[in-house]
Amino acid sequence: MKNILFVASEGVPFMKTGGLADVVGSLPKCVDKKYFDIRVMLPKYTCMKQEYKDMLTYKTHFYMDFNWKNEYVGILEAVVDGITYYFIDNESYFGGFKPYSGNVLDDITKFTFFCKAALSAMPLLDYRPDVIHCHDWQTGLIPVYLKERFQANEYFRGIKSIMTIHNLKFQGRWDIKTVRNISGLSDYYFAPDKLESYKDANLLKGGLVFADAITTVSDTYAEEIKTSFYGEGLDGLLNARSRDLRGIVNGIDYDEYCPEKDAFIEYKYDAKNFRKEKVKNKRALQKELGLTEDDKKMMIGIVSRLTDQKGFDLIAYVMDELCQDDVQIVVLGTGEEQYENMFRHFDWKYNDKVSANIYYSEEMSHKIYGSCDAFLMPSLFEPCGLSQLMALRYGTIPIVRETGGLKDTVEPYNEYENKGTGFSFTNYNAHEMLATIRYAEKIYYDRKREWNKMIDRAMAVDFSWNVSALKYQEMYDWLIG
């Protein structure tokens, strides 16, 4: 039996702010239990819902020297869906109303404490990992500490580490003197070939230098981050470590996202009966949102954080033109004020065509996947992206820009070969996007049979975690040897 310990700053069901939590919550359940014992370690945030706090049982505690103080570290445990979760408890670090304070220095201090406490807690667990699988910058110091002070302890010798990049944009950077003080690492570790990056300390870089293997969440993104445009200042290092870097596309939970039994959608459907049933959800959503009730109107959905990264500057540029077309647009999400207000404006101006829902709701997101004809996702960069996978699962045709995971998961429609599961455009250009949307409209209105065949293909592709889990298992085997 091979032991793999995931260490992350969030994980479903206990805490979720983004796609990272879905990966940490779903992947361990899909790995083959005959060969792998995967467990998960998370911070115990005071802002966790009470129902999850009630699941935790106290295991033990100890005191640890950190940032010139002697700090309490509690270890708690819970078992959910057959997976064991450990929690690191210290209310002064994990208090507050949300997991990330947004103050970079506070977050760096909190997660440096978490990294050191997570490693210090391991010998007390009656479980020794062969591999520690670290996720994003918040756990970047684990591979560093593992090769530094923890090597002296027999227990840690031979433990391998993996660093997974979910989004390279976030790195945990602050000035060297402060980070050296907080982390207790010597000057040796703050050199350009280690944690130093453009005169600052960089926690993610530390993880990438010291980990035994590096993964990211799609093949294309793994290639893109070796270029200066996508590399966020770390492309040199990622090129140097390219032999240890691999892309494994994320999956989604096919039980949770399942049009046949989705509790949030009124009319269930599958690949056989979607032609008759799915349109009933569209009718219901049109009615609920006050849009023109018309089965034949093409409805385009957007579920996203409203930020530049997600391509909303392109949408803002052509939104007026797009609203001249015979389409309806349903938006769900929050983010940058300019985009929230832009959608509110168009909702006011084209009230029967545009519905701006500037909040987030799991229920409404499922209704959009289960009702719309197409799903728009024109990202500037997208390490993996989960929304397009959900859209495919619900037979809602994705219209995407060819970047990162979007390029790896959406096959562009080819009318001559009857292939493809969506529509895509190459350049980050508003009118190229608009032309692609209009091409999709043309197929939707003029070649309905072709459109329905595309839905058949979209609903047949498998982006469940089971496929990705096999690739992770291969990597664990290769690493443990």
Image: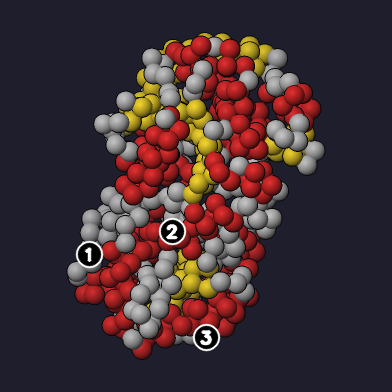
On the rendered structure, is 93 left or right of 13? right
- Does dot 1 land on a helix, a strand or a loop? loop
Amino acid type of the residue that numbered disc 1 sits on in the rendered structure:
Asp
- Along the polypeptide, which appears first: circle 3 or circle 1? 1
Spatial separation of the CA atoms under disc 2 and disc 3:
26 Å
Closer to us: 71 or 390? 390
Pinpoint residue 266: horizontal percent, then vertical percent: 26, 62
> In the rendered view of the protein, which quadrant contains the C terminus?
top left
Query: So how many labels did they put on this image?
Result: 3
- Along the polypeptide, which appears first: circle 1 or circle 2? 1
Amino acid type of the residue that numbered disc 2 sits on in the rendered structure:
Ser
Image position of 354 with respect to 102: above or below:
below
Pinpoint residue 24: horizontal percent, then vertical percent: 43, 39
Q: Which residue is mark 1?
A: 270
- Tell me which residue sits at (37%, 83%) in the image: 416
Spatial separation of the CA atoms under disc 1 and disc 2:
19 Å
The residue sitting at the left extreme is: 272
Q: Is residue 470 visible?
A: yes
- Does dot 3 land on a helix, a strand or a loop? loop
Q: Which residue is mark 2?
A: 387
Pinpoint residue 245: horizontal percent, then vertical percent: 54, 44
- Does dot 2 land on a helix, a strand or a loop? helix
Q: Which residue is mark 3?
A: 324
- Tell me which residue sits at (50%, 78%) in the image: 436
Pinpoint residue 54: horizontal percent, then vertical percent: 36, 26
Closer to us: 208 or 295? 208
Spatial separation of the CA atoms under disc 3 and disc 1:
33 Å
Q: Residues within 10 Å of mark 1 (few under 14, many from 20)?
A: some
- Tell me which residue sits at (44%, 51%) in the image: 249
> In the rendered view of the protein, which quadrant contains the N terminus?
top left
Q: Quadrant of residue 431?
A: bottom right
